[in-house]
Amino acid sequence: MQSILQCMDCDRQYPVDQVAYTCITCGGLLDVQHDLHSLRQTVSHELFDRRLASLGPPHNSGVWRYRELIYPDLADDQIFTRPEGNTNLYPSPKLAAWAGLGRLWLKHEGENPTGSFKDRGMTGGVTQARLLGMQRVACASTGNTSASLASYAALAGLEGIVFFENREIALGKLAQAIAYGATCIQVSADFDRNLELVRSISEELGIYVLNSVNPFRLEGQKSILFEAIQQLGWQVPDWIVCPGGNLGNSAAFGKALHELLELGLIDRVPRVAIIQAEGANPLYRAWRKGFDDFEALQANTIATAIKIGNPVNWKKAARTLHWTEGVVEVVSDQEIMDAKARIDAQGIGCEPASACSLAGARKLAKAGVIGPDESVVGILTGNVLKDPDATINYHRNTLPGLRASWPNHLHQAEPSIAEISRILQPDEPVPV
C-alpha cells in the first residue's frame, strides 16, 4: 500500500523516499497520496475507536491512532511521537450565545506537548526526516513551529535550526526553541523572507525543511479533524472555523475531509471558514476576487502566529474552499483580542491567533452566513501562555490602538485588611 507524492497542479508523481516539497516540472505543491481503494478494506470507525484505549505508542497518539490515513506501513519504531494530539473538544454554550451560534465546540490544540497544533504536523515531518536519513531540520517561524521543531528534533536526535524575524516574537515561543536546544537565528526580515532563506539554504546545505510546504507536515495536521469528528461520535458539524496564517491547517482540513468522505467514514462534508486578521489577509483578498490572482502583502497584526503575508499553502487552502463550499472572513485586532478575552474567561485560554475562530464565527453569524441552528467546531491553535504579554497588556488596557472591552483589572494593595476588603467588598462597610 505504498503512498506517493503527487503535484496538485500537473499530477506528476514522485516516490516518498526522496526529498521533495514542490514539483520540479511546474513548481506546484505536492500532496501525499494514499491508496484509498485499499484503505477502504482496512479502516473503520471501530478500528479507531478501539485504539482509544491504547496506553503506549504509537496508538496513544492522537495522530498515529489514524496511522493508515497519515503514513501507512510504518513500523512502530520508525515513528517519533511525544505523544501528541488527544486534545479536548470543549462544548461552549456561553460562547455560542455570545457569538450568536446554535452549538459551538472548541477544539483546543494548545493542549499539545509544546502548546500548539504544530506538534501534530511535526511528528509526521520529523518521522519522514529520519526515514530519509536527514541529520538536520530547519524552519522559518513566527514562534509555534520553532518550539515544535526544536522539541521533536531533540526527540529524534536531529539538529534543529530555526530562523526568526528579529522583532515581534512572543518570548514564550522563543524561549521554548532555545530551551529545547535548537540553533536559533534572528534575521532582519519578516517570516515570508525567512522562509525563502530557509528553503534556499536548506537546498544548498542538505537540510530538511519542516515548514508547512512539507507535505508530511500536513498529513499529521489532518488528524485535528479526524479526532474532532471522532469525539463527536463520527457526526459531522455544519462548520469548521479556523485561523488562517500560512494556511497549513486550512490545506490539511480539506484533504482530511475529502479522504474521510471517500473512505465512507463520514456521509457529508462540513463547510470550512478560514479567518484571517485584517492586517494579514491575502487569502481573503484573493477569495473576494474569485482567485483571479493572488497578491502577497506586508503583514501586521497582534496575532503573531498568523502574521504572514505570502502563505505558501494558499492554493491548497483555495482547494479546501472549493471542496467544502467554504468562505473566508477577516477580523480586526480589536475583534481578535475581545474574542480571546471571552474564551480566556471561560477558563480555556488561547493565544491571540486562536481567537480568530470565535471572532470570525461571530461575524459570520451576524452576517447570516452561519445559521442560528447550525453547529460549529472552532479550532484553537495555541496555548494562552504562548503570548502572555498580549494577554496582560490587553487587561491593563495598554495595547496600542486597542481598548480592553472585557478587562480583568490587576489590583494593587498595601498589606492592610481594610484596603484589601475594599477591593473584595467595595460596596460593603469595613468593620472597625
Image: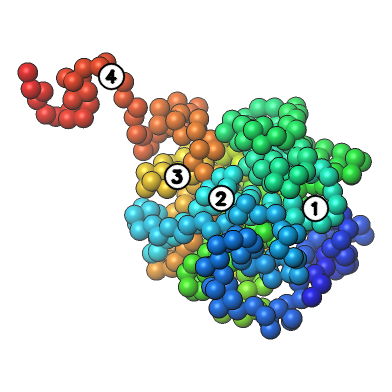
Spatial separation of the CA atoms under disc 4 and disc 1: 55 Å
Q: What residue do we see at 70% from left, 34% from top?
A: 181
Q: Find residue 9 and report its horizontal and vertical position in percent.
A: 82, 64
The answer to which quarter of the image holds residue 422 is: top left
Q: Which amino acid does label 3 sit on?
A: Gly
Q: Which amino acid does label 4 sit on?
A: Ala
Q: Residue at x 17, y 30 (%)?
A: 425
Q: In this view, does 288 lie to the left or right of 402?
A: right
Q: What residue type is labelled 2?
A: Asn
Q: Mark 3 points at which residue?
A: 349
Image side of residue 232 versus residue 417, left or right = right
Q: How far apart are marks 2 and 3 (CA)?
A: 14 Å
- What separation in Å lies between label 1 and label 3 (alpha carbons)? 34 Å
Q: Which mark is residue 112?
A: 2
The amino acid at mark 1 is: Arg
Front tag of 2 and 3: 2
Q: What element carries label 1?
A: helix
Work out whether mark 3 precedes mark 4 in sequence or the reverse, and give the earlier one.
Answer: 3
- Position of residue 252 relative to residue 2, above or below, is above
Q: In which quarter of the image is residue 71?
A: bottom right
Closer to the N terminus: mark 1 or mark 2? 2
Horizontal side of residue 348 vs 330, given as left or right: left
Answer with left or right where residue 334 lies relative to residue 27. left
Q: Which tag, 2 or 3, sits closer to the chain's start?
A: 2
Mark in front: 4 vs 1: 1
Label 3 Cα crowd, 10 Å radius (few <14 / some 14-19 / many 20+): many
Seen as rendered, the residue at the extreme bottom is: 41
Tag 2, which secondary structure? loop
Provide the secondary structure element on which disc 3 rests.
loop
* Residue 359, image x, y percentages: 47, 49
* Residue corresponding to mark 4: 413
